Amino acid sequence: MELGDHVLRVPPLRRSQARARLRGRMPEADFEEQILKELHRLAITPEAARWIADNLRGTTTRDVEQRKASRQTLEQALSYWRS
């Protein structure tokens, strides 16, 4: 699954419903249901979560390896100059 070119488009909340809620016209249960529907729609799939985790794991592993190599090089340079 390629997500690199994926663009998340989120429509604005339904203004008429949001305004009605602010004026006390929308029952609280309806408002909560609307929010839950929006959150459910925005939730990522388990497949997408695995893809994200796999890519982050690879990125962080490479980053740690690069930092270790840099540290070893700096420590070697310091030990050379100290002797």
Image: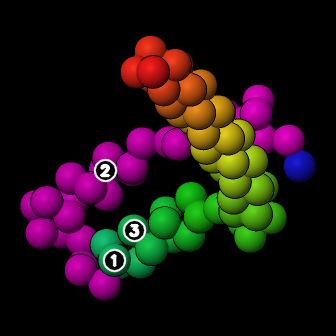
Which residue corresponds to the image point at 31% horizontal and 58% vertical from the top-left? 17
* 66, 52: nearer the viewer: 66
Q: Are marks 3 and 1 in contact (CB under 8 Å)?
A: yes
Residue 80 showing in the rendered view: yes
Evaluate if marks 2 and 3 touch, with contact meaning CB atoms under 8 Å apart. no
Judge left or right: residue 80 versus residue 23: right
Q: Quadrant location of residue 78?
A: top left
2 or 3: tag closer to the N-terminus: 2
Judging from the image, what secondary structure is the residue with disc 3 in? helix
Residue 44's image quarter?
A: bottom right
Q: Residue at x 77, y 41 (%)?
A: 3
What is the crowding at mark 1: few (fewer than 14 residues within 10 Å), some, or many (at least 20)? few
**Residue 28 screen position, x and y as percent:** 23, 80
In this picture the colour scheme is: rainbow
Which residue has dot 3 on it?
35
The residue that label 2 is drawn on is 16
Indicate which disc residue 43 carries. Answer: none
Q: For the magenta stretch, what is the residue range?
A: 2-29
Amino acid identity at mark 2: Ser
- Residue labelled with disc 1: 32
Q: Residue at x 10, y 61 (%)?
A: 23
In three-dimensional space, the C-alpha distance between marks 2 and 1, rounded to whole angstroms, equals 15 Å
Magenta stretch holds residue 25:
yes
Q: Is residue 10 above or below residue 70?
A: below
- Classify residue 26 as left or right of residue 43: left
Front residue of 46/12: it is 46
Percent position (x, y) of residue 77? Answer: 52, 19
